Structure formats: structure tokens, C-alpha cells
Amino acid sequence: MFDLLFKYTKDGWWAAILGPVMVILEIVFDVAIPYAMSLIIDQGINARGGDISYIMRIGLVMLGLALLAGIAGALSGIFASIASCRFVRNIRNAMMEKIQSYDFKNIEKFPVSSVVVRMTSDMRMLRMAYTSIVRMMVRTPVNLIITLIMIIRLHSTLALIFAVAVPVLGCGLIYILKTARPRFRVMMKKFDGMNSNLKENIEGIRVVKTFVRADYEEDKFSYVSKDVMVTQRFAESIVILNQPFFELVMYACMIAVAWFGGKFIITGSLSTGQFMSYLSYVRQILFSLLGLSMALMQIVNARASVDRANELLNEVPYIDDSEADPDLMVKNGSIELKNVYFKYFEEAEKPTLSNINLKIKSGETIGILGPTGAGKSTLVQLIPRLYDIYSGKIKVGGKDIKDYKLRNLREGVSMVLQKNTLFSGTIEDNMRWGNPDASFEEIVEACKNAQAHDFIMSFPEGYDTMLEQGGTNVSGGQRQRLCIARALLKKPKIIILDDSTSAVDTDTDRRIQLALKKKLADMTTIIIAQRVNSVKECDRIIIMNDGMIEDIGTHKELLKRNEVYRDLYTTQQQGVAE
Ligand code: ATP
């Protein structure tokens, strides 16, 4: 936790320093008040026989001290709040930056809902703990030291009561903290589960409604929510013991001080004024210990959040491009894969892709067909280095992909993923997301090539039409065409369409391919499809099966020699005819 504190306090350092300074001032003023009170009793009332002007003067001093203590206390709260808000903002920004550096393999480790909780609820916990650290972690030790000195000076024998009370409080506190920590960890995990469940339900609400599964989802959520409640109650049940335990010890101390203090007054070793200020110091000590214990409780809660933040922040991207040449750009659309093997998990026995050898010339159009799970998407994801290969070599534009900075490589290789997404904003905003510098004419041209222009113009607001998050207010086929247009706008050397026209009708699909082939002839195009018609115009078609390339050829060649391709084509043509 303290690592994080030092690293991310950055622009809030002045507030982080001023906060404790104000706390120290507050304590100094606080500690002076009981001393002034003892002067009123011992000097003003007892020694000077009720000297009103002396009592008034000291009374005014006490008032001033109380006022100053209040101002210092308020300022310490304000500075602590400024420091904690900035601290949490810095961590959040760092987390966001880190997540952006993740590659696909890292992303798969963290469910979306868990990332959201880490960046919201966990950060709230951390902010509260930070404020407590700034206030209590300084206040308590300083207060304790000063007050202990004062009470030892007043009556050292009476101070022995604390030699018993402090260890008792310490042991109780350690027990509570130790028991609470694992419980809070489990609680945060359960929170993640509940959020995951909620996200899945809300995102899939249309499917839930279609299948009339609202009751089932309600039951499922209520079970998860109950589980969270039970875990939360279990975790907090130990924390709530803190206050009664402290109060018990506190009042026992007060009684002991009153008992022994009374005796010392009778024997004359303690004056009434000293006794009164002694009681005030005792209260101060016990309240600051109670405050410390509460702050520690918050810190324990926050420890679970710190661990979770660190998990995100310390995650190392699997793909490292630090050695790559920052000036190397993709010059052309040629691709070469040499003896490529790939597996998603190191420990997997069988590779997902085996012995892939393939040469694609710049400007070629390549189709990829094959049964589901054959490895088509996996193969194309290796070209922009979304995953690193297990062995072999991949070249793009004549250079090993590891020689490029990821940013430069992915500028040259544009990919429309199978599960693509649009963002909330206008259609034009979404297009510019692909290329912020594109002119409106370039946007229109990309949309025309992706056969999206006509339907965009059919909307009353045209390119200013607002898209909802995920593009849910346009049809599946329209969404796919917008995603293709966005990828084209980057003017890449290579474009990969991973089943990106599956929801588009056959005629529009053909027009997209023609536009890619004729108008964007310099660009290498790779099209993964389920329909033979979507790839039959390609220069070459790759047939994949079981993670391997089974055959490569033109439509005509494959029709002649490849039985699987011929069967697939015949069946699909029959389907079209019917
Ligand atoms: P489809 O046509 O259904 O999209 P595909 O030919 O594109 O299938 P891939 O998605 O490349 O097939 O999947 C190849 C194999 O790799 C499958 O067995 C799949 O379960 C596995 N696989 C795919 N993605 C992952 C992943 N992220 N983690 C682990 N295994 C994966």
C-alpha cells in the first residue's frame, strides 16, 4: 500500500504534507487545552482564591486554542481529501493506461466486471483509507507521544494504568485485523462475481427476453446477491467488535484513573486541577487509539483493494516490442508465414495451429474457409501480432513482425474482428475513431466501399446519426459494414475481415468484395467466411482444417481437386437456388 502511496501521490504531495502538518498543529492546540484547565483550577481557584481576571484570561486562551484546533482540524481534513482524490485519480489513470497496454492474452485474465469494480468500488475504499492514513496515522502517534509525556509529567505512577491498557488494546486490535483481512478478500471476490452476473444479464437482456428467462435470471441474481450479503455480514461482524472493545477498555481505564487518582488526591500527591487535566488526557489517548483502530480497519479493507489494483498494475503484457525499431513502418502488404506453430496455453499438448507455411503477395485477395474451430481466426490474429507465435516466423512487408513497434504494425494491418464493436457517438465519430485525421470525403469514400453509404444516407441525420453503445440501434449487417468502413479508413496495407460479412446479404457481400478487389487493388485483403460465395472471387482460397492448411488454390482449381470444397460449394449453391 505504501508503495502505491509514494508512487501515485505525485501532484497531491503538497496536500499530503500539509494534511499531517495541520494534524500536528491540531494536536498541539488540543493538548494545551487540558493544561490551561489545570491552571484555572490549581492557580485561579485554589492558589489565588478565585482570581476572576486570571480565570478569564486563561479561559480566553483556552477559547483561542479550541478555535485554532478546530481550524487546523478542518484544514487537515480538506488537505487529506485533496490528496486522497488526486491519489486515487492517478491510480485510476495508471490502471487505464496499463489496460491499454495489455494484449489479448492479458485481457482474457481479467473479466470486464472485475476491472470495473477495481476502478470504482476498490478506489473508493482506497480513497477512504488514504484520508485515514493522512489524518490518523499522523495524529495518533504524535498525540500519543505528547499526551503520554504530559500524563507521566503529571503523575508517573498513575500513568502505569496505560502500561496495562495499551498492550490489551494492541492484542485485541491485532486479532480483529488478522481475522478481518481474509474475510474482506473473499467479500471482494464475491462482489466481482455479482457484478459479472449483472453485466452478463444486462448485456444479454434481449436474449433473456426472447427466451422468457427473466424468472431464472432473477433467481440466479438473488442467489448471488444473498451470497454477497452473507459474506459481507461475516466480514463486517468482526469489524464491528472494534468499537465496543475499545469502549470497554476505555471506560475501564477511566474508572481505574478515577479510583487511583482519588486516592492520590487524598494522599496529596495529585492536585484536583492535575486530576481533571489527567482525565482529559486519558480521554484524548483513548479516543485517538479508537481512531487509530478504525483507520486500521479501513486500511485492512483497502488492503484487499490495493492487492487487486496491484494485480492490474503489475500485469506484464505478454507481447514485448521494446526492442523494435520505432521508425519501421509496414511498406507493403506482403505476408509470409514460415513453419508457424501456435498454442493459446503453454501447457496445451496439441498446438492450435501446426506447420503453417504461406506466402501472400502484396495486393492479393485471399479467402479462408474451413469448419468451425479449424483455426481461421487464430491464424489471422497472428499477423497483427495480437498473439505471439510458439515457433516459426511471420513476416509482413518483408520484415519480421517482431521488428515493428506494435502500433506501427497495426497501423499497417487493419482487422475487422469477428466480435467487433461500435462506440456510443455519431456515425462520423465512429469512423474517425479509425483515423482521427480523415476528411469527410475520405469517410464517405470508405463507407461507399464498405457499402454503408446508402443506408447511412437513408437515416434522417445521415452521418450525424447517433449510435448507441455497441451499435445496438443498427442492424447486424449494417454494424458489420460500418466496422469494415472504419477499418478501411485507416488506409492499411493489409485488411483482414474475420467473418465480417456474415450478417450481410449475398448481393451486398459481393459488392463489398468487388470494391475491395477493384478500387483498393493495392491493399492485401484476407477474408474469412463461411460462404463459398464470399470468397470465390479471391485470387486464392485457403482451406483450413484442424489447425492446418489443407489446400490452397483458386476457386476453379479447388472445385476440380478438393472434394470438401466442391461439396461445400454444391451444397451452398443448392441452398441459394432453393
Ligand atoms: P469459427 O469459424 O467458429 O470462428 P475458427 O476456425 O476461426 O472458428 P478459432 O477461433 O481460430 O477457429 O479457434 C481455433 C481453436 O482455438 C478452437 O479450438 C478454439 O476453441 C480455440 N480458441 C480460440 N480462441 C481461444 C482463446 N482465446 N483461448 C483459448 N482457446 C481458444
Image (tube, helix red, strand yellow):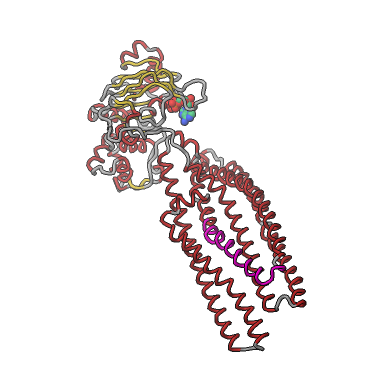
Residue 230, x across and y down, in percent: 65, 48
Q: Is residue 404 above or below residue 287?
A: above
Whether residue 15 appears in magenta in the rendering, the answer is no
Q: Is residue 306 left or right of residue 323?
A: right
Q: Is residue 31 above or below residue 559?
A: below
- Residue 173 is drawn in which quadrant? bottom right
- Residue 197 is drawn in which quadrant? top right
Q: Is residue 316 left or right of residue 528?
A: right
Task: Between residue 377 and residue 392, name the one nearer to us.
Answer: 392
- Residue 565 is drawn in which quadrant? top left
Magenta-tinted stretch: 130-158
Q: Is residue 509 above or below residue 560?
A: below
Residue 395, x across and y down, in percent: 32, 24
Residue 557, x across and y down, in percent: 32, 13
Residue under the image location 61 percent in, 59 percent down? 292
Task: Between residue 368 and residue 321, name the one nearer to us.
Answer: 321
Q: Is residue 171 above or below residue 445?
A: below
Task: Between residue 262 and residue 459, name the one nearer to us.
Answer: 262
Whether residue 147 appears in magenta in the rendering, the answer is yes
Residue under the image location 29 percent in, 28 percent down? 513
- The C terminus sits in image quarter: top left
Residue 507, x across and y down, in percent: 31, 29
Magenta: main secondary structure = helix
Q: Is residue 472 left or right of residue 310?
A: left
Q: What is the total number of numbered labels drawn onto the structure image?
A: 0
Residue under the image location 45 percent in, 51 percent down? 8
Q: Which residue is outermost to the top?
A: 561
